[in-house]
Image: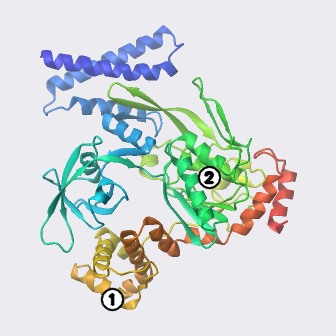
Amino acid sequence: MQGSSSRRVSLIALICVAVGSLAGGWLGSRVEADERRLDDGLDSFGRVLSLIEDQYVGTLDNDEILNDALGGMLRTLDPHSNYLDADEFGEMRDQQRGKFSGLGIHITKRGTDKPLTIIAPIDGTPAWRAGLQSGDIISKIEGKPTIEMTVQEAVKQLKGLKGSRVTISISRPGLKDDFDVSLERDDIPIESVRVSYLVSPDVGVIRIADFTTTTADELDSAIARLKDAGMNRLILDLRGNPGGLLEQAVQVSEHFLAKGKRVVFTRGRIPGANQDFIARADDPILDLPLIVLVDRSSASASEIVSGAIQDHDRGLLVGEATFGKGLVQRVIPVDRGALVVTTAKYYTPSGRLIQRDYSDIDEYQLSARHEAEAITDELPRTAPPTNPVAEREIFHTASGRPVYGGGGVTPDYLVPTPKAAPQLFRLVRENAIFDYAVDFSVNHPVLEPGFAFGPERLKEFRAFVSQRGIEITDADFATIADEIAVRIRAQIARIRWDQATEARILSEIDPQLRRALGLFGEAEALARVAATAGDPGRMSPEDAHRVVGSIKSGS
C-alpha cells in the first residue's frame, strides 16, 4: 500500500495548497480555534479519501476526485467561484490573451450522432492556406474517427504548440474519396469584435463577443473603418457576450464617456478590492449617437459597459434584461490548475448592484431565466413598472430616469428574442440549411452578394429536405418560408464571402436591431440632456421629474 499512501499524501498536500490560497484572504486574523477546526477538517478529508481508495469497488481516478472535491467546495460559496484544472486554466488564459496555437477553423456538431463539420476557415490561418472549406467534414484526427468526439474533445486535439503538426482526414461534398491534410499549427487570433458592418448607409453595427486583452484595440479599428465608410450612428451589439476582463470593459466604456465619469466601482474585503474606475480617455467619442443591444446572455463585463452607458444616459439599451452577474473573481494559480474566487462585487455608476439572486445555485446555473417584466415600450419611464421590477431598488441615471438594482440591467426598450419555430429548429438540428447552402455554393460559382432567393429556390430546398427524410407540411413550411430564405442567403454569404455579409442579411429578421434603428432620435436627445446633468444616482425627485419631462418633449 506504499504507492496508495504516497498518492494520499500528494492529494492532501494539494488540498492544503488550495485552502492556504483561500485562507490568505479569509483567515489571517482568526483565532487558534478556527485553525484547529481547519486542521480537523483536513484530517477528516484525508481519512475519507484513504477509506475510498482502500475499499471502493471500482477503479479510481484520483485527479478527478480531487478536482471534483475542490470544485464542490468552491461552488458552495457562489455560482462563479470554481476550480479549474490545468486544461481549463490553459483555455481560460488563451481566451484572455486573445490567441492560441491551432489550425484556424470554426467547427460544429449539431448532435452526438452528427459529423464534425467545418463552418468556415479563418482567413490567413493554416486551415485557410490549406484550402479547407465550409462544409468539409473532419472524419479523423491523427487516424482516430471523430464521429463520437465532442467539439471540445476535437478542439483539444487540434490545438497544440506552435510549429507542431497534426493530420486530419477530410470528407468533402462532391468528392468520392476522403483525403488527408497535414497542417502545421500556428498562432490563431481570437477576435473579440466578431463582426462590424453598415446596416444602412450611415448606421454601423459592431458586435463584441467577449472581453479579452485585445477588445478595446479591436473596437478602435472597427469604429475607424466604419467611420471611413460613412457611419455617423452606432449600434453596439453585446448580445450573447458572457463577459471577460474587467479592465477591458472599462476601456470599452471609456470610448463613449466623458473624461472623469465613473465607469464602475468594486467593493470587497481584501486589500485592493475597493476600487473606482474612472474614464480617462483623452478623446472619447461623444458625438456618435449610440444604442446598445443586450439579451439574457449578456453578462459580467458586458453588463458593466451597458450599465455605464445607461446610467450616464450616453445611449439607449434595447433587448432583454441581462443575465445579472455583479461579482468579481480573482484567479489564483495553484499546483495543477487555478482557483477562481469571488473577491468583490461591482456596482454601476448610479450605485446599482445588478447581481441576480443565487440562493438556489442549481437553478441559477441551469437557467438564465428572468421573470417576465411588464415594461411599457415608452422612454423614459416616469413610474416604476409592475412587479417584479417594482420590488427592486430604484436608482436614477444622470438625467433622472429610474433604473433598477438586482436581476440584471433592464433595457430601456424591452424587445424579446423570438423563439424559433419547432420546424425551423429541426432543419438547423439536421444541418439541412447549412448543407443546402454548401451544395448551392458549389453549384453556383458565380454569385453576387445581393443574389435573390425566391420561390423557385425555396421549392428546391423543400425537395432537398424531403430527400433527407424530413417531412414538413405545406402549412408549416409556409409559416417559416420567409425566414428560411433569409437564413439560406445568410449561410451562403458566410460560405462565399464573410461573416459581416452574413450578419447584414440576418439583420433583416432581427427584431431587436430593427427596433434600435428607429430610436436614434431619442438617443440623441437623451445624450444632449445628460451632457449638462450631474452624476447618476444623485438627483432629487423634483429635478428628476423636470428632466424626464424635457426628454419626453424632445427639448
Which quarter of the figure is the N terminus placed in?
top left
Residue drawn at (33%, 34%) of the image: 85
Where residue 474 is drawn, which disc sits there?
none
Q: CA distance from mark 1 to mark 2?
A: 43 Å
Instruction: Specify few, some or many for label 1: CA neighbours under 10 Å numbering under 14, 14-19, or 20 or more.
Output: few
How far across and down, in percent of the image, does residue 508 sit? 52, 76
Amino acid beneath label 1: Lys
554 to the left or right of 132 = right
Where residue 306 is drawn, which disc sits there?
2
Q: Closer to the N terminus: mark 1 or mark 2?
A: 2
Instruction: Specify few, some or many for label 2: CA neighbours under 10 Å numbering under 14, 14-19, or 20 or more.
Output: many
How far across and down, in percent of the image, does residue 318 sit? 61, 63
Residue 295, quarter of the rendered image: bottom right
Give the residue at the far bottom of this rendering: 456
Q: How is the image coloured?
A: rainbow
Vertical placement of residue 104 versus 198, above or below: above
Q: Is residue 489 visible?
A: yes
**Looking at the image, which is closer to me, 92 or 234?**
234
**Looking at the image, which is closer to me, 45 or 6?**
6
Residue 48, quarter of the rendered image: top left
Residue drawn at (41%, 14%) of the image: 37
Vertical placement of residue 398 versus 289, above or below: above
Amino acid beneath label 2: Ser
Which structural element holds mark 1?
helix
Tally of numbered tags: 2
How far across and down, in percent of the image, does residue 8 sit? 23, 19
Which structural element holds mark 2?
helix
Residue drawn at (46%, 47%) of the image: 364
Vertical placement of residue 344 versus 181, above or below: above
Where residue 459 is drawn, which disc sits there?
1
